[in-house]
Image (cartoon, rainbow, N blue to C red):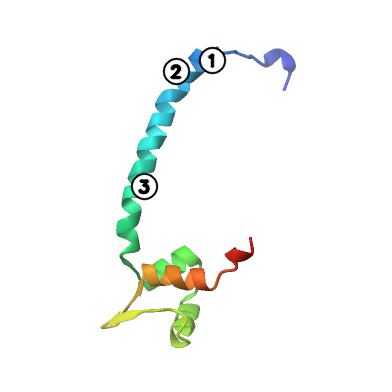
Amino acid sequence: MDAKNLNFQFFSKEELQNLLTPIISKLEIIDRKLIKSTPSETKGYFRNKDLRKKFGLSANSIIKYRELGLLPFTKIGDVYLYPIEKLEEVLNDNSNWDLF
């Protein structure tokens, strides 16, 4: 890129604040909506497809972890449901976060 083609525009502090204020307020709205949606999600259940998508597990790994007792589940008919809250406990219990 040629330096002659570069156009710089300088803004005063007030002009920059006027440009950023609407963006920040929209981000705050999005943040509040995300916070509201999180608690209802944690009371739900994952299905096999959710575990594959969210954690990158294969169908065989899910079956193996279930059989080994590593994954808490509920079975209704042929459908396996994994309580999100219990999976979070499993993740926390098997983490090494306390080392950091």
Would you identify the image quadrant in which residue 31 lies?
Answer: top left
In this orientation, which residue lies closer to the viewer: 83 or 59?
83
Q: Residue at x 33, y 44 (%)?
A: 33
Q: Which residue is mark 2?
A: 18
Considering only vertical position in the picture, is 100 above or below 87?
A: above
Mark closest to the chain's N terminus, 1 or 3: 1
Give, as a three-letter code, the residue at label 2: Asn
Residue 45 drawn at (x, y percent): 33, 69
In this orientation, which residue lies closer to the viewer: 86 or 26?
86
C-alpha distance separating marks 3 and 2:
25 Å
Give, as a three-letter code, the residue at label 1: Lys
Q: Residue at x 47, y 73 (%)?
A: 90
Q: Which residue is mark 3?
A: 34
Residue 43 drawn at (x, y percent): 31, 64
Residue 85 drawn at (x, y percent): 37, 68
C-alpha distance separating marks 1 and 3:
31 Å
Mark 3: which secondary structure? helix
Q: Which residue is mark 1?
A: 13
Query: As drawn, which residue projects farthest toward the left?
Result: 77
